[in-house]
Image (cartoon, grey):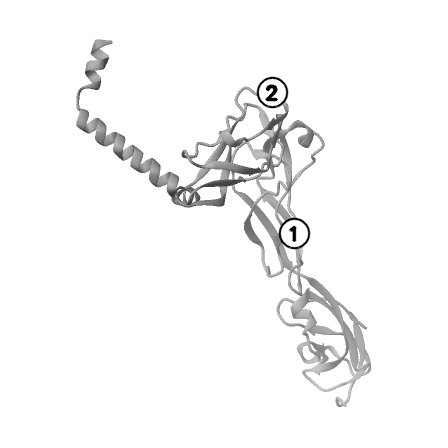
Amino acid sequence: MQEWLATLGRHKGLKLLSLLLALALWFAVSGEERTEASLHVGLEVLNLPAKMANTSEVPAELQVRVIGPRSIINKLAQSRQTYPIDLAGLKSGSHTFYPGPNSFSFPRGVVVNRIQPTSITINLSPTIAATLPIKPVLAGNPPEGYELKGVKTRPAQVTVSGPEQELTDLKFIPTHPIDVRRLTETTVLATDLDFKNLHLTLKNQVAILAELDIQPKTLTRTIPEVPVMPEPGPANLQPAHVAVIVQGPWLLVKDLKLGDVKATVDTRSQGRGRSRLNVSISLPQGVSLVRVQPVSVTCSPGKTP
């Protein structure tokens, strides 16, 4: 006791100064104008148990209404405040947390007036792993004249983990919509998996690629009334016109004109009288002949009309 009393007697000046400063600070704070404000307090979920998933929707933050000295409230509003939710040791099921006025380490003089929401519920569910195929989801159609021949993803399947009740009946994992409206050739695009509202995670983080096989559409078209020309010499032909059925890329065949198709017969094989000559067809590159109707014409000596 004597030693303690002796200690009190040491450095009396410094101790008196500290007491005066503390009293001055207390009076300054207590006499300061008080104000009310809402603070955004972030929620942090900690220590999620192994092989468990949180299937509840947890708000990102709490709205905490406080009253206190203006200077302190202003500092709190500019700083990052958090409220931890510790899940260590919890079993599967529903767990509710009730943040109260004493849940926050605010400075002295700050009073908590209201907390929203008043409770936070965490649903813990056992997790399992499953390997599921990836299903590409497409948006729109290729431009006019092109078509999608096929689509596949690399990898073709992924292993995910999540709540047992979500994975039990799940047949595939869709991608986010892949826009094909401007694609005119085979293309490989990066995409992402769409877990929607499911609480799933990839066992291994991998890039998801979609390979889209885009090809020109094939168009079959009939070009009627194509004139048949005798070569090299003149002749009378009957009929003088044929119908030509062609096939090729949609854009090329669609714009094909009558002058782009040439029908001829070789009059060098013509006899003195009437003869039957096969019709030959010349087409632009990339266009193929399906058939010509008729395949041959009657040829007789004479001048071409």
Which disc number belongs to residue 138? Answer: 1
Name the secondary structure under disc 1: strand
**Could you say which is closer to the camera, residue 253 or residue 260?**
253
| Residue 28 placement (x, y as % from top left) | 34, 40
| Residue 100 placement (x, y as % from top left) | 54, 30
**Could you say which is closer to the camera, residue 186 or residue 265?**
186
Residue in view at x 54 percent, y 19 percent: 89
177 in relation to 101, above or below: below
Residue in view at x 75 percent, y 88 percent: 304
| Residue 166 placement (x, y as % from top left) | 67, 32
The quadrant of the picture occupied by the N terminus is top left
Residue in view at x 56 percent, y 54 percent: 187
For label 1, count other residues whose C-alpha is less than 10 Å away and answer few (under 14), some (14-19) or many (20+). Answer: some
The answer to whether residue 294 is left or right of residue 61 is right
Q: Amino acid at mark 1?
A: Leu
52 in relation to 302, above or below: above
The mark lying in front, picked from 1 and 2, is 2
Mark 1–mark 2 distance (CA, rounded to whole Å): 41 Å
**Could you say which is closer to the camera, residue 269 or residue 228?**
228
Name the quadrant containing residue 23: top left
Name the secondary structure under disc 2: loop
According to the picture, the residue beneath numbered tag 2 turns out to be 91
Query: Do tag 1 and tag 2 residues touch (Cβ < 8 Å)?
Result: no
The answer to whether residue 157 is left or right of residue 237 is left
